[in-house]
Amino acid sequence: LLPASSFLCLGISITVWFTLLFVFIIMPAVLGVSFGIRSFYMRTLLKIFEWATLRMELGAKEKNQELYKPYTNGIIAKEPPSSLQQEIQELRGSANSLRSEPEFEMADIFYFCRRGVESIVDDEVTKRFSAQELKSWNLLTRSNYNFRHISLRLTVLWGLGILIRYGVLLPLRVTLAVTGICLLLVLTTLVAFLPNAELRSYLSEKVHLMCYRICVRALTAIITYHNRENKPKNGGICVANHTTPIDVIILANDGCYSLVGQVHGGLMGMVQRAMVKSSSHIWFERSEVKDRHLVAKRLGDHVADKTKQPILVFPEGTCINNTSVMMFKKGSFEIGCTVYPVAIKYDPRFGDAFWNSSKFGMVSYLLRMMSSWAIVCSVWYLPPMNREEGEDAVQFANRVKAAIAAQGGLVDLIWDGGLKRAKVKDVFKEEQQKLYSKVLVGDSEDQMEDKRSEDGTPEGDESSKDPAEGQ
Amino acid sequence: MGSRASTLLREEEIEEIKKETGFSHSQITRLYSRFTSLDKGENGTLSREDFQRIPELAINPLGDRIINAFFPEGEDQVNFRGFMRTLAHFRPIEDNEKSKNPTASEPLNSRTNKLLFAFRLYDLDRDDKISRDELLQVLRMMVGVNISDEQLGSIADRTIQEADTNGDNSISFNEFIKVLEKVDVEQKMSIRFLH
C-alpha cells in the first residue's frame, strides 16, 4: 500500500512540475513572449541586498569597527601618467634636456623603484583575470571575501538563499538546459532533411532562436538590448568583448550568427555537428587554428557570401572579467568587411558571469552560473564601422575596441589578454631600457620617435610595432 | 565556506602590523586582498614567480632587484608581514609623525629608511658599500644593450668620483645620503595609499 501511494505522489508531483514548467517557461520561450516574472524577481532581490548591506553597516557601527570596502577606487592614487623622460628630469631638478656628455644620477633609480612597487600594489592587468569585487555582499558564499559583521538574521537569509538556489532554482534550470539542448539536437537534425533550401534556412533560424531562448531562461538571464537598429547584417563580422562562453547564448538569443571556433569532442562536438547541419558555422580543427591564412580565407569566403549570416568573433581571444577590454587580435579586422561592434556589460550583483578558466572547468562553471541568483546584462549594438583610408588593421582594431569600451563603461587596455597564461615579451622591457638610455646619452636623435613609444604601455602584438619603426 | 581573507587575518595580527608599519586598518585589509590575489599557490606566502607574473613589473628594468628587496636574506618565500614591512617604506611621511616620541625606533618610512631601501637596490652583497661593479650592474640593467661598455664604465667612474669623499673607490651609505640631500626623497619614494 505504501509504495503504491508514494509512487502516485511522485507521479503527480512530476506531472505538476512539468506542466508548470511548460506553461510558464517553455511556451513563452517558444513563442517569444514574457510574463515579466524575471524583472519582478530582480527588483525583489535588489531590495533584499540593500537590506543586507544596511544590516552589515549597523553591525559594524555597533562593534565600532570599519566595514570592509573593496578597492573599487584603487588601493593607491596613481599619478597621471607622464613620460619616463619627464619624470627623471623632475627627479634631477634640471631643466635642460640637451647634454653633450652622458649624465647619470643615482636618484634615477627612484623612478623605476616607485613604478615597480606601485605595480606590485595595484597593476592594470592581473586583476582582470579574476572575478571583480562587489561593493556589497549579495548573499552568495563565493563573493564573500572579506565581508564581516554577518548577524544571525543575515545568516538565516543566506541559508534561505542556499535552499532556494540549490533546491528550487538549480533543478529547474538544469531541466530547462537539458530540454533546450535536446530540442536543438533533434530539431536541427530534422530541419536538415528538408529539401527546400529557403524553407530550411527559415526554419533553422526559428529553431535556433527558440532553443537559445530556452537556454537563456535556463540561466535566468535578464538581458536588455539597446540600439537594435544596429544589429549585425549578413556579410559582416560581429565583434564583442568576451567575458564567458555564455556571451554566445546572450547574443544568439537576439539574432542568428555563424560561430567560429575549434572543433571539440564529446557533447560540445555533438552540438557543433548538429548546428552545422542546418546553418553554416565555421569550425576549425585544432591544427588549422595556427594557420592564419587558412583562417582568414575561410572567414573571407563566408562574408563574401551575402546569404550567410554574420560571423560572431571575440577578438580578445580569452575571457576577461568584464571590467576592461584588452587587446583585440587583428585577424578579423584584416578581412575588409563591415564590422559590427557589440558591447556586453554584466551586472555582477546577481551572479558574476566571468569564467575563470584557470580555476573552474566548464561543468563547475555552469553549475555556478545556474546556482547564482540571475545573470543580468546589457547589450549595446554599436553603429557599423569600416576600415578607413590609411588605417591599418591594428589601428582599426584599436578604434573598434575604444568604441566598445566607451559604450560599456569598461577600461580600454592595450595589454594582451594572453598574459593570463603567458609571460610578457622581453621586447617591452627593452623598450623601457632604450628610453632610459636616451635620457642618459642625450637627445641626439629625432625627438619625434620618443613621443610615439613614450607612454610606456606596450602593445602585445609584435606587428603593431611596425608603425613606430616605419617612420 | 566563508571568506578566505578574513579567516586568515586575525584582528591581533592587524593590530600588530598597524603598530609596526603605520598603515590603517582598512589599508591593511585591502593590501591583504591584494596579497592573496597574487598568491596563486594559496599557501600564505609569495614566491618570486608570483611577483614576476605582474606584467608591469616584469617589464621594469629593475624589476628583479625590486622583487629581491621583498625577500629576507637567502629566503624564497615572503609572508604577509614581510610584504607589509617592505611596502611600509613607501608610505608618505606624515607631519604628525615627525614630532613623535624621539626614543621610539625610527619608522619604516622615514627619509633615512627610504634612502636605505634605494641603497640596498645597488648594494647587492650587503657589504654597506656600492662598488664600481655593483654600480655597473645596475646601470647595465637600466640601459640594456643600448650603451657600450666603455661609455657605461666612464659613467660609473664619474659617478663614483663625484660621490666618493673618503677615497675608497666605492660609495658608502653616508656618501649616498650626501649625494641625494637635495632630492625630494619623501615625495619620490612615496606611494599615496588611499584610506
Image (cartoon, grey):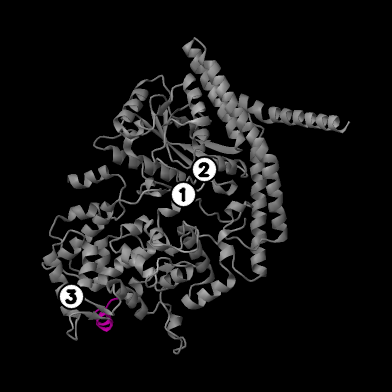
Magenta span of residues: B173-183
Residue farthest right in this picture = A1
> Which of the 4 image quarters holds residue A377?
top right
Circle 1 chain: A
Q: Do discs 2 and 3 share a chain?
A: no
User: Residue under mark 3: which chain is it in?
Assistant: B
Tell me what residue is drawn at x 29 percent, y 41 percent: A395
The answer for how far apart the CA atoms under marks 1 and 2 are is 22 Å
Visible residue check, residue A68: no
Q: Which residue is mark 1?
A: A323
**Which circle's residue, 1 or 2, is located before the other in the chain?**
1
> Residue at left 21%, top 76%?
B131
Q: Residues within 10 Å of mark 3 (few under 14, many from 20)?
A: many
- For residue A292, above or below residue A316: above
Residue B176 part of the magenta-drawn span: yes
CA gap, disc 2 to disc 3? 56 Å
* Residue A426 visible in the snapshot: yes
**Picture coordinates of residue B41 (x, y %)?**
47, 57
Could you confirm whether marks 1 and 2 are on the same chain? yes
Residue B151 placed where, x, y %?
A: 12, 66
Q: Position of residue A346 (x, y in %)?
A: 52, 44
Give the residue at mark 2. Answer: A361
Which percent across, then down, holds residue B156? 17, 72
